[in-house]
Image (spheres, coloured by chain):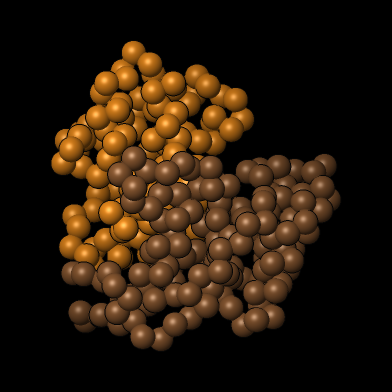
């Protein structure tokens, strides 16, 4: 099965907030996409136009934002960039996506936007287009 | 950890794509690679967990013939980058395994 090469004709815009560990991943020795660039490449292969945001941490920072004493600070960090970007994405009718589970929870609680994991978008697009059933 | 307990639909999506592409997918029994232990400073627990994960990979014939993929960046990069520091006496063995460890997004682009 080959699904490389933008076989999908209908483009859908997504706004992508990568997980911090993913952003910290360096370039691969073989030059292939790694970390953030791999998710961008995967989404593009599935036909999506990707707006990659560089807005720092969402504020959840692992389990930091789950702590009662850190909640307010966590939300303030999110408001520095990520939460604003996700509200903008929704205003532009773009799908919000993030690879971080805690990031997606922070986005939902901070903005009401239901960000999705890119793998779900890719799976639904790929199998919807090429279903063998 | 999130994929096991909170958002199994993410791991299911990865499984569906890999299955669709014809890969034979086995799920490791361990939950995560130990990133949660490391993030809270439980180094001993992380080391024990790493040994368990490595045993499970080796039981599948780990090495050049087995690619290990994951959905959660902290877990994948914990396995890929931290295991040598946790178990330095097993460096050569770990490096032979971790050169085939990928975030599933990276695996799809390889």
Q: On the rendered structure, is B64 left or right of B39?
A: left
Q: For the point 65% across and 74% down, which residue is it?
A: A89
Taking B67 as reference, is B47 above or below it? above
Q: Position of residue A4 (x, y in %)?
A: 27, 69
Q: Quadrant of the C terminus of chain A?
A: bottom left
Taking A52 as reference, is B4 above or below it? above
Q: For the point 16% across and 41% down, which residue is it?
A: B65
Chain B, chosen colour in render = orange
Evaluate whether residue B10 shows in this view.
Answer: no
Evaluate whether residue B94 shows in this view.
Answer: yes
Q: Quadrant of the N terminus of chain A?
A: bottom left
Q: For the point 18% across and 55% down, which residue is it?
A: B24
Residue furthest top in the image: B89
Q: Position of residue A26 (x, y in %)?
A: 46, 41
Q: Position of residue B94 (x, y in %)?
A: 30, 26
Residues B33 and B107: in front is B107
Q: Position of residue A5 (x, y in %)?
A: 29, 72
Residues B61 and B85: in front is B85
Residue furthest bottom in the image: A10
Residues B46 and B103: in front is B103
Q: For the point 54% across and 48% down, which residue is it?
A: A23
Q: On the rendered structure, is A89 left or right of B62?
A: right
Chain A, chosen colour in render = brown
When asked about the image quadrant of residue A112, the answer is: bottom right
């Amino acid at each position: 099965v080959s699904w490389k090469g933008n076989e999908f004709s209908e483009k859908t815009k997504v706004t992508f907030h990568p997980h911090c560990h993913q952003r910290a991943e360096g370039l691969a020795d073989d030059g292939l996409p790694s970390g953030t660039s791999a998710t961008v490449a995967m989404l593009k292969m599935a036909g999506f136009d990707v707006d990659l945001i560089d807005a720092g941490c969402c504020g959840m920072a692992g389990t930091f934002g789950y702590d009662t004493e850190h909640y307010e600070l966590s939300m303030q960090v999110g408001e520095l960039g990520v939460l604003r970007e996700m509200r903008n994405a929704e205003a532009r009718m773009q799908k919000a996506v993030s690879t971080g589970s805690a990031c997606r929870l922070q986005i939902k609680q901070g903005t009401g936007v239901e960000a999705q994991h890119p793998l779900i978008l890719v799976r639904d697009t790929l199998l919807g287009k090429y279903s063998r059933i | 950890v999130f994929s096991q307990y909170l958002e199994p639909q993410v791991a299911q999506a990865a499984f569906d794509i890999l299955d669709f592409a014809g890969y034979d997918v086995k799920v490791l029994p361990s939950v995560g690679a130990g990133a949660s232990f490391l993030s809270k400073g439980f180094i001993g627990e992380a080391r024990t967990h790493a040994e368990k994960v490595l045993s499970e990979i080796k039981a599948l014939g780990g090495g050049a013939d087995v690619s290990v993929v994951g959905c959660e960046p902290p877990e994948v990069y914990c396995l890929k980058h931290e295991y040598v520091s946790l178990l330095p006496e097993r460096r050569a063995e770990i490096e032979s395994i971790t050169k085939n460890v990928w975030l599933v997004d990276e695996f799809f682009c390889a």
